[in-house]
Amino acid sequence: MSEERKPYLGNPQETIAVLQKYHFTFQKKFGQNFLIDPHVLEKIIRAARITRDDFVLEIGPGIGTMTQYLACAAGKVCAVEIDRNLIPILEDTLKDFDNVTVLNEDILKVDIGALARQQNGGKPIKVVANLPYYITTPIIMGLLESRAPVASMTVMVQKEVAARMQAVPGTKDYGALSLAVRYYAEPYIAANVPPNCFMPRPGVGSAVIRLTLHERPPVDVDDESLLFGIIRASFNQRRKTLANGLKNDQALDFTREEIEEAVEACGFPPSVRGETLSLEQFAALSNVLGKIRRNRK
């Protein structure tokens, strides 16, 4: 942390004082749960590996608690907050931190690539966020799929969502999200966080997960959209065999014979289920089915 500036938010008394000063009321539609534990905030900064060389994009700064910690550790911080009622509070709590910019925007509509070009010379940025539970997956997948210059994402999410992101084949948490995350990044759960670390308290536990993005995907696929279409179809009816799950998905448009041919070509048993396949095996299946589709013509 910087010697000149230190974060002063991060415990219940200070949070309550700021909220009362501005007569702020929590809005359920934004999924607002503010962190009130300095130890957790410090864990997030360490997990994100923030240095003075970093430009950090914070999603949902709330009253600016984690923003203060980020401002002390990073070279520059851009905080994107959707709730306009929080903007006057942020102007107050961040007034002593000259390396912070606040945008009153919906993160799903922000061009992250343009932001990186304008504020960080196009170099990769680090994303840090205490994400609203109701929109966690769209935000994370939107960032991953955008191919914006992002080096890592260190985010607070619902504990069960973190478990799904890090899950391995054959486990109950393993699914389409696990595979999508692995395709784009390496997941690491840095900390589990109980409900009493937030205001108001959520009804479930949380976890801090860091996603370190790959420079290139760990598997070679000829058609990404086909790969993810196969993955989605495999888990839409996860108790069915892989062949039945793919056959029942009209968007894929493969015959049973073509699917069985591909499953056999990959060396999988006929009764194999998608929940047992690794990302590498899904990639192999996708490439075989893609070749079968091309050879129709």
Image (cartoon, helix red, strand yellow):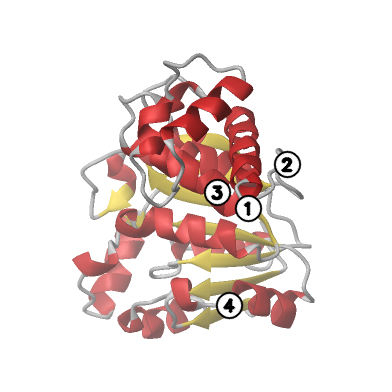
Of mark 4 and mark 3, the one earlier in the sequence is: 4
Q: Rounded to the nearest whole Å, what is the CA distance between mark 2 and mark 4? A: 27 Å
For the image, the number of numbered tags is 4
Three-letter amino acid code at the position of disc 4? Asp
Question: Is residue 48 among what the camera can see?
Answer: no
The residue carrying pointer 1 sits among few (fewer than 14), some (14 to 19) or many (20 or more) residues within 10 Å by Cα, namely few
Q: Which residue is mark 4?
A: 111
Of mark 1 and mark 4, the one earlier in the sequence is: 4
In-front residue for pair 89/279: 279
Q: Which residue is mark 3?
A: 226
Q: Rounded to the nearest whole Å, what is the CA distance between mark 1 and mark 3? A: 17 Å
Q: Rounded to the nearest whole Å, what is the CA distance between mark 3 and mark 2? A: 13 Å
Of mark 1 and mark 2, the one earlier in the sequence is: 2
Three-letter amino acid code at the position of disc 1? Lys
Residue occupying the far front of the picture: 297
Task: Assign a secondary structure to mark 1.
Answer: loop
The tag on residue 297 is 1
Q: Which residue is mark 2?
A: 220
